[in-house]
Image (spheres, helix red, strand yellow):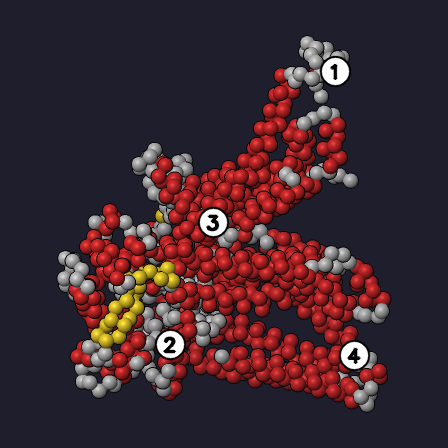
Amino acid sequence: MPLLWLTAIVIALSLIGYALGRHRALASTGGDNRGLHSLPVYYGMNALMKSIVPALGLMVIWQLAQPLVIQNRIADMIPASEIADDANLSLVMAEVRRTAEGLDNAVARGFLDEDTASNGRADFTDMTARLKDAGQVVTNQITQPVLRAAQAYRQMSATSNAVMTAAVLAVALLGAGWGVMQSRRDFRARNVVEQGVLVILIAAASVAILTTIGIVLSLIFNTIEFFRLYPAAEFFTLLEWAPSFSGRGGASSLGILPLLWGTIYISIVALIVAVPIGLFSAIYLSEYASQRMRGIAKPMLEILAGIPTIVYGLFALLTIGPLLVSVFGQNGVGWMGGGRSVMTAGIAMGIMLIPFVSSLSDDIINAVPQSLRDGSYGLGATRSETIKQVVLPAALPGIVGAILLAASRAIGETMIVVLGAGAAARLSLNPFEAMTTVTAKIVSQLTGDSDFASPEALVAFALGITLFVLTLGLNVFALYIVRKYREQYE
Amino acid sequence: MTEASMPTTPHAAPRGSLTTVDARTKKRKAAEARFRMYGIAGIATGIFFLLVLLASIVGSGTGAFQQTFINVPVYLDPEKLDKNGERNPSDIAKVSTFGYTPLIQDALLQQVQDNGIETPLEDRGDMKAMISASAAAQVRDTVLANPDLIGETVEFRILASSRVDGYLKDRVKREDVARDKNIDAEHLDLVDALVPLGIVQKTFNMDFITGADASESRAEAAGMGVSMIGSFFMMLVVLVLALPIGVAASIYLEEFAPKNRLTDLIEVNIANLAAVPSIVFGILGLAVFIQFMHLPQSAPLVGGMVLTLMTLPTIIISTRASLKAVPPSIRDAALGVGASKMQSVFHHVLPLAAPGILTGTIIGLAQALGETAPLLLIGMVGFIASNAPDSIASGLLDPNSAMPAQIYEWAKRADPAYYERAWGGIIILLLFLITMNTIAVILRRRFERRW
């Protein structure tokens, strides 16, 4: 991997810079570090930072920009006739990239010589067959324009890589040289290094912002793309979810409402399971339980929170589902067709949410000041009366917030519904019927073989943005309630 | 408080004695006891669910660590395996697994007949249902590695088919076999007869821990090994990226950041990112890393980067908590003896907060290790046919799978034999998580200081 080597060389250069910078600074005072402005280490660090940060930064930016630039140049080379045939530009570009990769691999394994790979013509030499012989994945017959583009792509990538290597090494060398030249006795190395470190810290802190921007942009752009292919009004109002598998857009009906209904129904079932159990556990643990019992029961409940969701998914599919079928299925009451249903997923999700509700409520109940309880006891109330009439009303906003956070978790949960809820989108009230959710459909639309440009795949981004807005809204609302109605106890 | 103590109440109940409990007190005490019971019932239900969950994991998953093997001496017929007798490796390699299958079937039939077992299965083809489809590949690999074996009779321990395995594990019932085209009741009779002879044997299955995934029809050969390596690579990426970025971000926010709009924005962002559903991070990874940057699909590098973004908020929140726990007197003392702000943080605060940071990081890693949904979107369910030693060399950019994704893959398959594998995979996954969490708890107990 040449990038790895380049990185290694840059690191080596910067280490040399470190040694030289430190040495030069010490030499400038004749080996006596009392004469230096900063500790000798800082002179070395100055040279090291000046060479490694810009060089690696340049490398990363180059790697990000290179495909975009090359793609733009190549796009001009592809004649319109090639695109008009079947799909759009991005499909042809994918084809070009695949061909280029195939050529690279074929050369690397010795099936093609460099000359044929870079100059061969699809109409004279049968490039498709030769690539297939070399064990490369080539989907259909390579046409001459595509091959030309692929060859140009290889050419440009190679040139670009060579230029990048040279540029990165030059930057590293110049940086190290600059740092070393600065290393004199009066140079304020520590201040410069500390400024640099601060910049790095700020950059790290902004990764969080970049992530959010990345999420929002990738969702928005693809959603706009989707609405260009599929009317937004239908997406939000249609009562039917039936994507066609042929890849042709017109035949699909992609209405979000059945998915939203499934999501909400399953979340309600989950909350009906989790809230009473979690809330009563929290009340008992914080108000009644002895120290010893609390020490045992609380960690045990919290184990439930540490179990990965795939485990709950499997538990729903293979344990809860068959159990429900044996009671409500054909041999029992007859309400249930298969093991996958709203109840199956809802119960598993409810179990997952128990520790979530209980530990959040526990914290909130514990935050209610003891003086309120003492006042209530002083008036002659029993413990349960105190809890019901004093503690819970005081803790209510917090508890509502906790339940809303749990609901947001339930809406965003994926693995349990993918395995336990079924794949058919339905608007039904029967909780023993299979339904599907927004998250389950995101997975199924993006893991199939359909290409990213079809509305069937792009709809996943529209679903994703709905999910994102929904969970974010619930979270913000929960925090707002907690803040607004929190009693101020001093 | 009883009614008797309030003589001034207008509608006072008839006076009773303080020592006899009146109806209202009884009612209130009953309500108290009831309320208490609700609490106990809540905790009991929660713990009951936990126990059921653990019981079904252990109960259904331990089977995957055992596998049925058939011990059989196979005569490696030179007529079939090396026609011209030159022991030329390239000639031997030309014989595909189809050439080996009859040899194994003959060998098993021979065993059955030598031991005088009464069975209506007298044909070589009847043995097919007993033997795994990967047995021929196993024998072929042995022969290719050691061509001198040709012409000899070699003792092999080959995999039994998943139905035979399921029969010995009570998964395949006799009454179901009638509808199963892969195996007949006669085969099960034969298995019953072969078990006491030690020819069919159920032993510990190392291949489940080290092996690779297998195709749909060969559940008996599937293992977790390769996906463990995939998970390991991803955790490496997460550790290398998330730890430095998370610690640097926390140091800035906790120690240097001025109170302004930008810092507020970052803080709100981190709090919200922690609550974003994991599948949204998968969409992000798909759109940015694969669609936009054209990184390879199914690569542990991409999986690791997605999981990094997902665990960063967790790590930042716990790191900030442990930085905050270091008392200000430490910082003041460092500043007092002439250290710069940066020196006081890096030389004094950070080392003191290190145990807490490590604990938080390990918990974040454990969370990332069990995460499945984002991995499905970036295609980390790659089917890798090479076994553990070969795939170790494959790096961060080659297609790989991950433990939870592998479990999901098995849970989706139709053959119930794969369900047992999925539960077994969960046992392995949970063992890793328990280990990581135990290390975190020990670190906290051992090194965390209370100021």
Amino acid, disc 1: Met
Closest to the observer: A103 or B60?
B60
Residue labelled with disc 2? A102
Q: Earlier in the sequence, mark 2 or mark 4?
A: 4
Residue labelled with disc 1? B6
Estimate the spatial distance between the alpha carbons at disc 3 and disc 4, rounded to whole Å: 58 Å
Foreground mark, 2 or 1, reads 1
Say how many tags the image has. 4
Hey, which quadrant is residue B359 in on the image? Answer: bottom right
Q: Earlier in the sequence, mark 3 or mark 1?
A: 1
Q: Height in image: A400 above or below B4? A: below
Disc sitting over residue A39 in the figure: 4
The quadrant of the rendering that contains the C terminus of chain A is top right
Estimate the spatial distance between the alpha carbons at disc 3 and disc 2, rounded to whole Å: 49 Å
Closest to the observer: B109 or B162?
B109
Residue contact at pointers 1 and 4, CB within 8 angstroms: no
Q: Secondary structure at mark 3?
A: helix
Disc sitting over residue B54 in the figure: 3
**Whole-percent x, y for residue A311 in the image:** 46, 52
Q: Secondary structure at mark 4?
A: loop
Residue B400 visible here: yes
Q: Is label 3 on the same chain as label 2?
A: no
Query: In the figure, is residue A416 to the left or right of A170?
Result: left
Estimate the spatial distance between the alpha carbons at disc 2 and disc 4, rounded to whole Å: 54 Å
Amino acid, disc 3: Leu
Amino acid, disc 2: Gly
Q: Chain of mark 4?
A: A
